[in-house]
Image (spheres, rainbow, N blue to C red):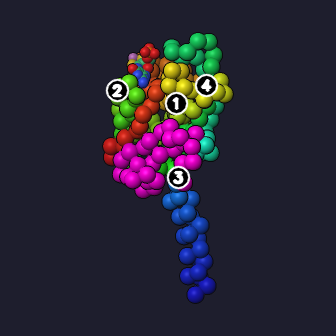
Amino acid sequence: MKRLLMTLAACLFMATPLMALDAPQGAVILTIKGPLAHPNSGADAVFDLAMLEALKGRSATMETPWTEGKVTFSGPLLRAVLEAAGAPAGALKVHALNDYTVVVPADDAGSLDVIIATRLNGKTMSVRDKGPTMLVYPFDLNPKLYTEIYFSRSVWQIKDIEIVP
Ligand SMILES: Nc1nc2c(c(=O)[nH]1)N[C@H]1C(S)=C(S)[C@@H](COP(=O)(O)O)O[C@H]1N2
Ligand SMILES: [Mo]
């Protein structure tokens, strides 16, 4: 009996953080679509700024072809967002507000510290400034990524990310 209770307690302890995805309190700035284990808005997982910034993230200082000089992007790791949404392994169709769409291979989220940037030099990004979110590759950690392939996956003004398992 004691062992059963302990097993139950351990299951609850482990399952709770995996299942819970709060409802956003603020404006939704990112939507994840697909067969998700932790949807919080119909079948989708939606995030406001605070939810994204509560996830494990990083800050990266780099140069990019579309910004001037050295800039610092910060935001949650792509893989942390996918985990929070309970996304299965799969390719990511990243849709932008301007109808740009690119397919990001599943492996990028796992093997690279890609972030969904919510801030540029500490400030949130308006749609005019390529916000509210932008996919940022770790050009600072791995200069070999500084190629047209990864530039094309650097989607700004992200509307939603669709998982295609
Ligand atoms: N939202 C959005 N993101 C985008 C694009 C786009 O058209 N829309 N173009 C991609 C491509 S092909 C490149 S090379 C880089 C840089 O685009 P830029 O030179 O137009 O700034 O952004 C990428 N991200
Ligand atoms: Mo491009």
Q: Residue shown at 46%/27% (left/top)?
A: 157
Amino acid on which disc 4 is placed: Leu
Point out the residue furthest to the top here.
68
The disc label shown at residue 120, or none: 4
Kindly report the distance in space between the C-alpha atoms of the residues bearing marks 3 and 1. Answer: 19 Å
Q: Under tag 2, what secondary structure?
A: loop
Q: Which residues are magenta?
A: 22-49
CB within 8 Å, label 3 to label 2: no
Q: Earlier in the sequence, mark 4 or mark 3?
A: 3
The tag earlier along the polypeptide, 2 or 4, is 2
For badge 3, the amino acid type reads Ala
**Secondary element type, mark 4:** strand
Q: Which residue is mark 1?
A: 132
Badge 1 marks a residue whose secondary structure is loop
Residue topped by disc 3: 23
Q: Residues within 10 Å of mark 1 (few under 14, many from 20)?
A: many
Residue type (three-letter) at the residue carrying disc 2 = Asp
Q: Which mark is residue 55?
A: none
Decide which of tag 1 and tag 4 comes sooner along the chain: 4
In the depicted structure, whether residue 77 falls above or below residue 23 = above
Check disc 2 and report the residue beneath it. 99
- Crowding near pointer 4: few (<14 within 10 Å), some, many (20+)? many
User: In the rendered structure, are the residues bearing label 2 and label 4 in contact, judged by CB atoms less than 8 Å apart?
Assistant: no
